[in-house]
Image (cartoon, rainbow, N blue to C red):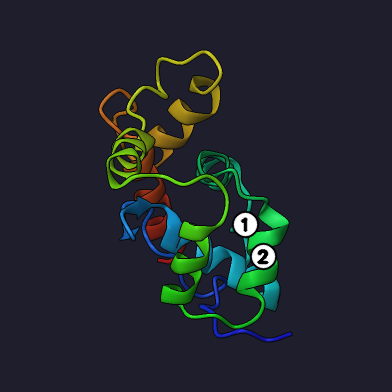
Amino acid sequence: MNVRAKDLTKEAPGSPKEKLGGYVCLPRMIDKCRAMINGTNGEFNFNCPLDKRLLEFKNIDAEEFKKYVSEGRSDEEILEWFNINGDFKTDEEIEKWSNQADRKDYATREDKKKWFIPYCEKLGLDPFKTSLFDYLDADDKASSS
């Protein structure tokens, strides 16, 4: 099936900071999912650890999400489906989750620092001042240059 999608072999998905319905990462996850369906995801993977965090927050199965996206749905239709499936979340819960999703502690976390510090340094970023989303944006920019 061919759905309307960015070609992620030529451009990066949306920034993880971008919101849809208050959810950070949702537009990026949609971009990656659509591209994966089309086989144009390049180095970007749908259902990566960040996507999993959002899907777990809502208690939505990645395959169910992918199936709905594969029907060629618009961003607005996907958001509506996302809101009515899985666990109900209030605007306050969504805002709280979105605010904490951009972790700023990867350089000090034992489970993250071994990959995060070298990758930040490779991009000229101070890993102790760089959030996860800032790193992803910088990496996307460097990859598409």
118, 44: nearer the viewer = 44
Q: Residue 140: which quarter of the image?
A: bottom left
Q: Residue 18: which quarter of the image?
A: bottom left
x, y (%) of residue 46?
Answer: 62, 57
Q: Secondary structure at mark 2?
A: helix
The label number, if any, that marks residue 66 in the structure image:
2
Q: Residue 79: which quarter of the image?
A: bottom left
Locate the C terminus and report the quarter of the image it occupies.
Answer: bottom left
For the point 51% across and 78% down, the residue is 6
Decide if residue 12 is in sight here. no
Residue that carries the numbered disc 1 in the rendered image: 46
For the point 31% across and 54% down, the residue is 22
Q: Is residue 14 left or right of residue 59?
A: left
Give the residue type at disc 1: Phe
For the point 42% across and 38% down, the residue is 122
140, 35: nearer the viewer = 35
From this view, report whether residue 15 is shown above or below residue 48: below
142, 42: nearer the viewer = 42
From this view, report whether residue 123 is shown above or below residue 77: above
From this view, report whether residue 116 is shown above or below residue 143: above
Q: Earlier in the sequence, mark 1 or mark 2?
A: 1
Give the residue type at disc 2: Lys
Decide if residue 140 is in sight here. yes
x, y (%) of residue 69?
Answer: 61, 72
For the point 33% across and 32% down, the residue is 100
Looking at the rendered image, the disc whose residue lies closer to the viewer, 1 or 2, is: 2
From this view, report whether residue 107 is shown above or below residue 36: above
Circles 1 and 2: CB atoms closer than 8 Å: yes
Residue count near mark 1 (Cα–Cα under 10 Å), binned few <14, some 14–19, many ≥20: many
Residue count near mark 2 (Cα–Cα under 10 Å), binned few <14, some 14–19, many ≥20: some
Q: Secondary structure at mark 1?
A: loop
